[in-house]
């Protein structure tokens, strides 16, 4: 009986036998060959996808930064956009406008409201004609009138010659009255002096150098804020930055804030170019923005994306 059971046990052991070492090695070699072949076919599509995703991300960052710059530049005070290049660092500066309106003038010949005086140095308020001019929350707010830019007497906001600081705004009987004062010394820079008159728009009749006041032909005024500066610094390694900052003062000397002074709009900047072209009649300007961003690829070095944007600026004061 024992002899009958032995063959069955032997057959059972043979059915439980595993793979041999040779079989495992052969299977591993075949798997490696198949995997390597698949990698050759999959690697290029995957690399292309990652490259496309990287380029799309850089394009989005550059496009968002340029669109923000364009939106703010279009709303800048006429003839206030200026560009400065210092050692490869580009600074684009302008004075932002929040709102505008028409001031009541003596020529309106009305007994309702307070006209803006260009001869009385003590008159520090005026009434708004038409729609009310809203002030920017948080301030400070300033009033600029007929800004023509650098080189024009009583018409350069950076020199604070046609600029006043808003001290109050009140509405009575649907009529808005804005009160103002001369810009204080703490908000002036670059050699600007505080106006000796409470009303900086006034040119007294008995002035030492008589001249016509800087009135607006259309009685326009703009509510503006402190100058805004876009600082762009690129380098060949793609580690430059584009930042936005607000100047602490008005100065005829272009501002040059440090990198840490601004809010980051874009990094990985390789190069940037900013140009401002003004038409001879000074009615418009064309601002050109070119921004190049880059990223380092392990296999092919620095890959770059360049975007170009042009902005038409209305310089009619």
Image: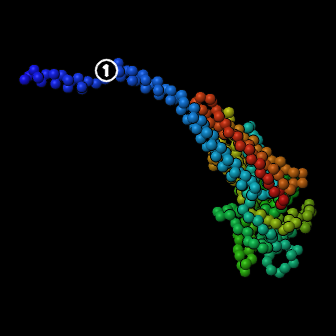
Q: x, y percentage for residue 282?
A: 87, 54
Q: Position of residue 288 (x, y in %)?
A: 77, 46
How is the structure coloured here? rainbow
Circle 1 Cα neighbour tier, 10 Å, few/some/many (<14 / 14–19 / ≥20): few
28 to 90, vertically: above or below? above
263 left or right of 108 in image: left
Q: Is residue 130 above or below residue 48?
A: below
Q: Quadrant of the N terminus?
A: top left
Query: Which of the pair 210/40 is nearer the observer?
Result: 40
Q: Secondary structure at mark 1?
A: loop
Image location (x, y in percent) of residue 140:
69, 61
146 is higher (above) or lower (below) than 14 = below
- Identity of the residue drawn at 33% across and 19% down: 21
Q: Quadrant of the C terminus?
A: bottom right
Say which residue appears at 88% left-offset and 66% top-offset. Answer: 217
Identify the image quadrant of residue 296: top right
Q: Residue at x 74, y 47 (%)?
A: 309
For residue 190, say whether it is visible: no
Residue 140 visible: yes
Across and down, in percent, residue 239 comes to 63, 37
Between 122 and 11, which is closer to the camera in this rendering? Answer: 11
- Residue lying farthest top? 22
Residue nearest the observer in this picture, 312 or 155: 312
Nearest the eye: 300 or 177: 300
Does 278 sit left or right of 53 as displayed? right
Residue that numbered label 1 is attached to: 20
Instruction: Please give the name of the residue rendered at 79% of the width and 77% of the height, measured from the top-left corner.
Output: 113
Quarter occupied by residue 206: bottom right
């Amino acid at each position: 009986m024992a002899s009958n059971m032995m063959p069955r046990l032997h057959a059972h052991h043979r059915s439980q036998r595993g793979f041999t070492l040779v079989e495992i090695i052969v299977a591993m070699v075949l798997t490696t060959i198949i995997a390597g072949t698949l990698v050759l076919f999959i690697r290029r599509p995957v690399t292309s996808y990652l490259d496309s995703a990287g380029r799309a991300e850089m394009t989005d960052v550059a496009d968002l930064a340029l669109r923000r710059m364009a939106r703010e530049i279009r709303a800048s005070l006429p003839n206030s956009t200026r560009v400065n290049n210092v050692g490869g660092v580009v600074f684009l500066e302008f004075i932002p406008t929040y709102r505008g309106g028409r001031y009541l003038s003596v020529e309106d010949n009305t007994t309702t409201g307070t006209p803006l005086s260009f001869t009385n140095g003590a008159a520090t308020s005026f009434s708004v004609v038409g729609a009310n001019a809203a002030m920017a929350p948080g301030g400070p707010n300033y009033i600029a009138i007929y800004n023509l830019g650098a080189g024009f007497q009583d018409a350069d906001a950076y020199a604070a010659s046609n600029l006043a600081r808003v001290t109050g705004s009140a509405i009575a009987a649907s009529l808005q009255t804005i009160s103002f004062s001369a810009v204080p010394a703490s908000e002036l820079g670059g050699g600007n002096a505080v106006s000796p008159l409470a009303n900086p728009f006034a040119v007294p009749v008995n002035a030492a150098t008589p001249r016509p006041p800087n009135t607006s032909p259309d009685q326009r005024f703009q509510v503006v804020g402190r100058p805004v500066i876009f600082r762009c610094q690129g380098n060949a390694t793609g580690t430059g930055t584009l930042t936005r900052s607000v100047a602490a003062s008005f100065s005829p000397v272009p501002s040059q804030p440090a990198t840490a002074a601004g809010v980051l709009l874009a990094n990985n900047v390789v190069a940037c170019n900013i140009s401002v072209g003004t038409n001879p009649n000074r009615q418009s300007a064309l601002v050109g923005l070119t921004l190049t961003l880059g990223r380092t690829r392990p296999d092919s070095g620095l890959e770059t994306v360049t975007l170009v944007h042009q902005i038409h600026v209305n310089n009619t004061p």
